[in-house]
Image: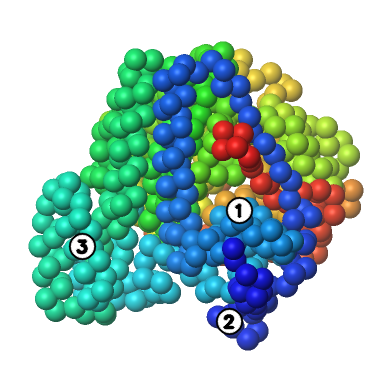
Amino acid sequence: MFRASALLLLMATVSTAAPDSPTWTEQHGEQILAKTQTIRLAPDLSTLTPGERTALSKLLEVGRIFQDLYEDSRHRQALDVRKKLEGHKSPRAEQQWTLYRLFQGPIANTLENQRLPFVDVDSIVPGKNVYPWGITKAQVQQVLERHPELRDSLLHERTVVRRADAASLRKDLDALKRHPVIAGLHPGLGEKLRALSAKPDPAMLYAVPYAVAYAPQMTKAHGLLWEAAAAVEKDDPEFAGYLRNRARDLLSNDYESGDASWVRGRFRRLNAQIGAYEVYDDELFGSKAFYSLSLLLRDDAATARLEKALQGLQAFEDSLPYEPHKTVSSDLPVGVYHVIADFAQARGANTATILPNDPLHARRYGRTILLRSNIMTHPELFANGRAAWEAVMAEPFRDHLGPSGGFNRTLWHEVGHYLGVDRDVKGRAVNSDALEENSSAFEEMKSDLVSLYLGKALRERGFYDDTTLRELYASGIQRVLQIVRPRRDQPYQTMQLMQLNYFLEQGLLEARPDGLHIHYAKYQDVVGRLLREVLALQRAGDKAASDRFIEKYTRWDDSLHGAMAARMRAQQKYRYTLVRYAALGE
């Protein structure tokens, strides 16, 4: 049991904060929890066979491994904090545990959109714990200037960057020794590490694959995935094959076999997103992927309806305002699912995913879209968003927001990731490499805009009627309304603010004394112009130009943006959502 005196020490004022930085107070915690709603996801699993249930239990264990890795990857003291907080029953400790669970670590996001440690730990750093703790971008770039041959390994999406000191090298060499299977899958790595260890140099950097950095965890996850595959083999051989391929991927650090069998597989009831894909948590270079795992139950009827809507994607690609267009497959796998449990980066009120991100894998095998129906259609989540909408919209527009808008915008946002520019003029991937830490913001903005830009064409096809098209357009406006001023390190909120300012500048939106007015007649033209600019920036791969664009369109005027944000905050009941899962006994 963690003693109260130690707990009070843990909750002391952050020692690493700058003198003029805001510090955590007990009031911060009370304010956050007062604005937190809890939802519980409990899909009906009665249709699962005994084999599927066994596989599910094994996959839940893998999810717990990934959860540990995610928390550790984001903050080097996270797991120590969690260990001290777990199970303690004092009111203050329970509050801190809820905050840890909500933010998946010891750093909270306050109502003022400040990131503060709520226990006595180091402040957040851009490179998290997948680079040497506290290293700056300039320091990494200095090493790359001296050793350009290291760029691919240091900025690889699934490597941990280390300082070449004796302790780090000894740790990684020991991992290879203890896990010969992993050593065999990474030929030559041991020799490189031994060469560095002959003359350790803390000023030098090197990188090791996640499979080596997290060798014990990946080995355990590998075994569990094989056990899950064996359990489900008779019920769903394609799903079993995917699990075996992904198990090998975790050791080889190469996801191609798993991605191919995942995207092209036709699974029965269960599906699972397994691995490290998204780079949102890397604020240093926007290149490191962080672990996530989602366990999903397929909704067959809803999936069949959506598959029909996705025919003829090449025509949509060819309609986008950029050149040269690429060839896309119309056989884009899509599924509507009920979330059984989410772990790590996927945990929360995430509505949908399209993966894989790797341009080569996407070209060879396509991408799969996973729509999380029991989150997308959750009545409490919709009601909370509607309250903020009504606070700032003029009365004639308040009833334009409907439940179909968010669902369809999310669906076509995910399709938008599949369409448009995927590599810049130098051949670099636009979703991570070309624009560095700006890549995610522009990729997400592109997909937002594609979802709106295609609305007119989908209305002509009969996918929308006048009401559902208007609900889509209203959802596109709701999406960009900012309840607090975004930080530069928040890609979603940053791109939303850019859209809001562009829409105001171009007259799609107009701020009047009675609230915001939408000029629907301008919708297609304004969205199309902004989409053209975004695609051009992605194609050029010009980091400096992207910085200038962000600077121009992230302006914040307290008399306009601040006033709207204040009205939304006053009206919105909840700011945060804590998701619990029946499958985890919650």
Q: Earlier in the sequence, mark 1 or mark 2?
A: 2
Q: Are marks 2 and 3 in contact (CB under 8 Å)?
A: no
Q: Quick check: 392 above or below 91?
A: above
Q: Which residue is mark 1?
A: 101
For numbered disc 1, what is the local secondary structure?
Answer: helix
Q: Which residue is mark 2?
A: 15
Q: Which residue is mark 3?
A: 174
Q: Amino acid at mark 1?
A: Arg
Q: Amino acid at mark 3?
A: Asp
Q: Is residue 502 visible?
A: no
Seen at 42% across and 54% down, the residue is 69
Distance of label 1 from label 2 (alpha carbons): 23 Å
Q: Quick check: 207 above or below 186?
A: below
Q: Position of residue 334 (x, y in %)?
A: 47, 24
Seen at 38% across and 56% down, the residue is 288
Q: Is residue 83 left or right of residue 91?
A: left
For numbered disc 2, what is the local secondary structure?
Answer: loop
Q: Earlier in the sequence, mark 3 or mark 1?
A: 1
